[in-house]
């Protein structure tokens, strides 16, 4: 099927690290993406990773990719209250899209940051 | 720098009425996508345009749904005979050509539809 799976909720203390996990479906996905959605705002691309990489770091964000297990994670270091949002994992599987078209999203992980 | 815009931002309608939404992509983005997002879920793909050609449609897009992009710029999504199950956020996204395998889509703020 086309199900991208994520845990639905994560609560962390301000200053701690957050780790959001995702399992995707298609090993042919060339890129994997993390989007952020804040209330009243559109989806914003946070970061992405190319499938031949196993790690990508971008300031406070670290993406880890395990292709064998089709597992993707997003680590946010020094989590701030402004990081409170819904985080979506997404893929563009060649099997289903026939050429880099639609994104398939997970249900999203709601990150709550408390003092 | 103008992002993707959508109009209206909110629409309340009665069951059985027709509604039309508009999306203006980032200029010079030739690829345009419509998604639907229901509460507690991620966006689900509806349809895809490359310039004015509609190249892919999801099975979610029933006969009551139609999308157009007549001049390859803005797009409209029409829902006829709305049902309560159509209540959702309708998202539009665009991206330029020539990015290789990177499918970075830029999303608009969405149109929230409520069918009473």
Image (cartoon, coloured by chain):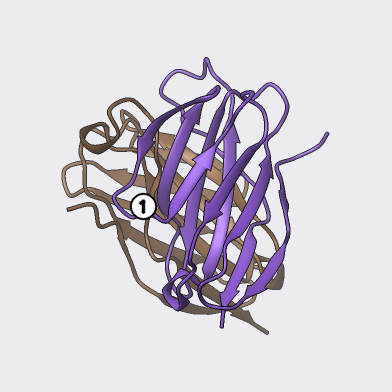
Chain colours: A brown, B purple
Q: Is residue A11 above or below residue B45?
A: below
Q: Quadrant of the N terminus of chain B?
A: top right
* Nearer to the camera, B1 or A55: B1
Q: Quadrant of the C terminus of chain B?
A: bottom right
Q: Where is residue A101 drawn, in percent x and y?
A: 39, 32
Q: Where is residue B63 drawn, in percent x and y?
A: 36, 52
Q: Where is residue B42 drawn, in percent x and y?
A: 43, 62
Task: Tell whether B6 sits left or right of B92.
Answer: right
Q: Is residue A98 above or below residue B6?
A: above
* Nearer to the camera, A19 or B20: B20
Is label 1 in a helix, a strand or a loop? loop
Q: Is residue B20 above or below residue A112?
A: above
> What residue is shown at x 45% (from left), y 73% (from top)?
B83
- On the question of residue B106 being in view, the answer is no
Q: Using the rendered view, name the quadrant where residue A91 is placed.
A: top left
Q: Using the rendered view, name the quadrant where residue B75 is placed.
A: top right
> What residue is shown at x 42% (from left), y 74% (from top)?
B85
> What residue is shown at x 39% (from left), y 66% (from top)?
A107
Label 1 lies in what chain? B
- On the question of residue B50 being in view, the answer is yes
Mark 1 residue crowding within 10 angstroms, few (<14) / some (14–19) / many (20+): few
Residue wearing tag 1 = B63
């Amino acid at each position: 099927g086309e199900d991208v799976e994520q845990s639905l909720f994560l609560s962390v203390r301000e200053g701690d690290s957050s780790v959001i996990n995702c399992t995707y479906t298609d090993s042919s996905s060339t890129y994997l993406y993390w989007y952020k959605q804040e209330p009243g705002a559109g989806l914003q691309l946070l970061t992405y990773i190319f499938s031949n990489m196993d790690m990508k770091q971008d300031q406070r964000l670290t993406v880890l990719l395990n292709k064998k297990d089709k597992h993707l994670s997003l680590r946010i270091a020094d989590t701030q209250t402004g990081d409170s949002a819904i985080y979506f994992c997404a893929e563009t599987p060649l099997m289903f899209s026939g050429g880099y078209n639609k994104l398939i999203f997970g249900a999203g992980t709601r990150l709550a940051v408390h003092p | 720098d103008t992002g993707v815009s959508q109009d209206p931002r909110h629409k309340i309608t009665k069951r059985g009425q027709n509604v039309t939404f508009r999306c203006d992509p980032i200029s010079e983005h030739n690829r345009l996508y419509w998604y639907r997002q229901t509460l507690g879920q991620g966006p689900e793909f509806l349809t895809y345009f490359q310039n004015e050609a509609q190249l892919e449609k999801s099975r979610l897009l029933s006969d009551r749904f139609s999308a157009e992009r007549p001049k390859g710029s803005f797009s409209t999504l029409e829902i006829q005979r709305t049902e309560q199950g159509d209540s959702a956020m309708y998202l539009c996204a665009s991206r330029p050509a020539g990015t290789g395998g990177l499918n970075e889509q830029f999303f608009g703020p969405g149109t929230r539809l409520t069918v009473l």
